[in-house]
Structure formats: structure tokens, C-alpha cells
Amino acid sequence: MSEVRSVHSGPEFFVQNLRKQTAASHQKLEDNHLSKAILEANVTLADYQTYLSALYGVTLGCEKCVFPLIQNVIPDLNQRFRSQLIANDLRATGFPQTQIDALPVYTFTLPNVAEAMGAMYVLEGSTLGGRMLFKHINKTLGLTENNGASYFWGYGEQTGPMWKLFVTAFTQFALETEQSAAIIDSAIHTFTIIDKWLDEAENEK
């Protein structure tokens, strides 16, 4: 029986279950109008700026509300601040600093570390999709990692290794604290939050 329990409670099972449980909410976010518009062949700079502006609000919000809760769990957290990359990209594409400063920022209300980790899973996972978005934006709008597309460039060639480091610490926390369910629920909720946030950003254009 102990072997059966270990198979269904180990790191791989947790990650597989997490992906399965969040699949629907993740797909809904990918189907969001702004998420799809950014991948169109005729994407405009205005589309890009609207999308970045919305991402800025949730990314900075996560850094303000989530990061303080998980600073003792993710050892390289200080390397994962990325809101400043969005601000750089907006400035590079014509946004004045005053307009960036006026962008709304989402306030995450997370009562514990487990829920914060669920939100961080969504934020860090976006770095993987960002690589694909970078290639598209580079091709369609001509933006580069040094001029307007640093956020989607993310960690560059270190994106894969950085993700693996995160997943290791993330999974260890989930298994050691036995809070997998709370983490998964929070991740699902975070996908939904971002989906609604993008809708609001589009309606305010």
C-alpha cells in the first residue's frame, strides 16, 4: 500500500494533477479575446500595448502581494521580478511614464503561502508561453528583447532552467506541507482573475 500511496503523492503526480485540474481555466484564458488578438497575423502595436498594459496590472500586483508571502520558499525570487520589463516595453513603444504610472494594478488577497504559490505558478508558467509570443511579436511588429519585447523574452535562454528550478521548489513545498489542493484551487482562481482582468482592459480601451 505504501508504494501505491507514493505513486499517487509524488512530485510527478502532483504536477500532472495540477495541469489536469487547471486545464479548463488555462484554456479559457488562452481563448480570451486579447490573448488571441496578440497572436493574429495582423496584430497592431495598439493591440500589443493594450495586452501589455493589462499584464502590467496583474504582474505588479503579484509582485506586491504574492512575492512577500513566498520569499522564504522560492530561493531565487529576486530574479523573478518582471513588471519592470513590461514598463520598459511600454516606454519603448511610445507610452509616457505618467500613463504607465496611472495603469490599474490588481490587488491579490491571499491569506496564506499555499494560495500565494498557486498564483505564482500561473505567473511563472507564463514565461513558457512568452517565448512563443516573443517570436510572433518579433516577426510581426519587429520588436526585440532590447527594444519593446523584453517581457516576452523573459529569462531568455534561461527560461527552461528557471522554470525547472521553480517547479522543484514549488513541488517540494506542496508535498512537504500537504497543501496541494489549496495550491491547485488558487491556480485555477488566478487564471480566472487574469481572464476577467483582460476583459476589463479591453472594455476600457
Image (spheres, rainbow, N blue to C red):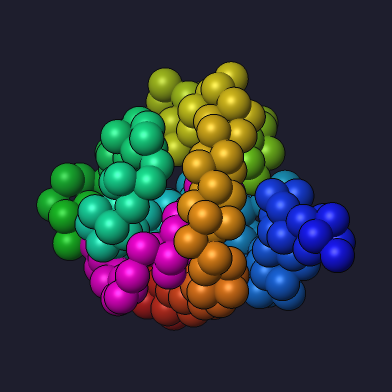
Number of marks present in the image shown: 0
Magenta segment, principal secondary structure? helix
Q: Residue at x 54, y 65 (%)?
A: 178
Quarter containing the C terminus = bottom left
- Name the foreground residue: 101 vs 46: 101
The vertical placement of 186 against 81, above or below, is below
Relative to 33, 93 lies left or right: left
> How far from the left and from the top, in percent, is residue 71?
29, 46
Q: Residue at x 80, y 60 (%)?
A: 2
Is residue 83 at all visible to an observer of this figure?
Answer: no
- Name the foreground residue: 20 vs 180: 180
> Which residues are the magenta region?
103-127
The vertical placement of 167 against 35, above or below, is above
> How far from the left and from the top, in percent, is residue 123?
48, 53
The vertical placement of 97 against 160, above or below, is below
> How far from the left and from the top, in percent, is residue 131?
63, 35
Quarter containing the N terminus = bottom right
Is residue 186 at all visible to an observer of this figure?
Answer: yes
- The question of residue 107 being in magenta is answered with yes
Relative to 24, 175 lies left or right: left
The vertical placement of 172 against 150, above or below, is below
Outermost residue to the left:
98
- The question of residue 115 being in magenta is answered with yes
Relative to 151, 157 lies left or right: right
Q: Residue at x 54, y 47 (%)?
A: 172
